[in-house]
Image: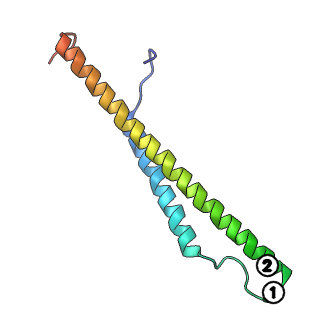
Amino acid sequence: MHPGFAVDVDALKRVGAQVEATAAMLRESVRAAGAGLAPSSPPGSAAVVAARGAERAWLAELRRLAGELDGFGADLSASAREYRAVDEASADGLRRSGVLPR
């Protein structure tokens, strides 16, 4: 690691969990909104057809964004676990070599 650089593993873990929670909230909001965002009358009008198309595109984009957020959160959480595991393994190695007290 670069001198003076430290990873706050607990903060990284918390941020990962918050990002995953945000993804879940977004996904639930999209589910709750369902297909009720576009106006339904007058049936067959060009504006309603266009609004429904925009609604489908918007919902698809929000679902995609929720999936990306899930991935980012999972990556942050995995990074926290990996940093901690490497740090603990390094400390164990230093203890075995006598550099650090047991």
From this view, report whether residue 86 is shown above or below residue 38. Answer: above
Name the image colouring. Answer: rainbow
**Quarter of the figure with the C terminus:** top left
- Which residue is located at x 60 percent, y 57 percent? 64
Q: Is residue 85 left or right of residue 42?
A: left
Q: Is residue 81 left or right of residue 42?
A: left
Disc 1 target residue? 44
Instruction: Decide which of tag 1 and tag 2 comes sooner along the chain.
Output: 1
Hey, which quadrant is residue 42 in on the image?
Answer: bottom right
Q: Is residue 78 left or right of residue 54?
A: left
Disc 2 target residue? 49
Distance from Cα at disc 1 to Cα at disc 2: 7 Å
Q: Secondary structure at mark 1?
A: loop
Q: Amino acid at mark 1?
A: Gly
From this view, report whether residue 32 is shown above or below residue 84. Answer: below
From this view, report whether residue 6 is shown above or below residue 41. Answer: above
- Which residue is located at x 40 percent, y 40 percent? 78
Q: Secondary structure at mark 2?
A: helix
- Which residue is located at x 70 percent, y 71 percent? 55
Hey, which quadrant is residue 97 in on the image?
Answer: top left
- Which residue is located at x 58 percent, y 61 percent? 63
Q: Amino acid at mark 2?
A: Val
From this view, report whether residue 84 is shown above or below residue 34. Answer: above
Crowd tier of the residue under label 1, counting other residues whose Cα lies within 10 Å: few below 14, some 14–19, many 20 or above: few
Q: Identify which residue, 21 or 57, lies in the foreground.
A: 57
Pinpoint residue 69: horizontal percent, then vertical percent: 53, 51
**Quarter of the figure with the N terminus:** top left
The single residue placed furthest to the bottom in the displayed view is 42
Pinpoint residue 32: horizontal percent, then vertical percent: 54, 74
Crowd tier of the residue under label 2, counting other residues whose Cα lies within 10 Å: few below 14, some 14–19, many 20 or above: some
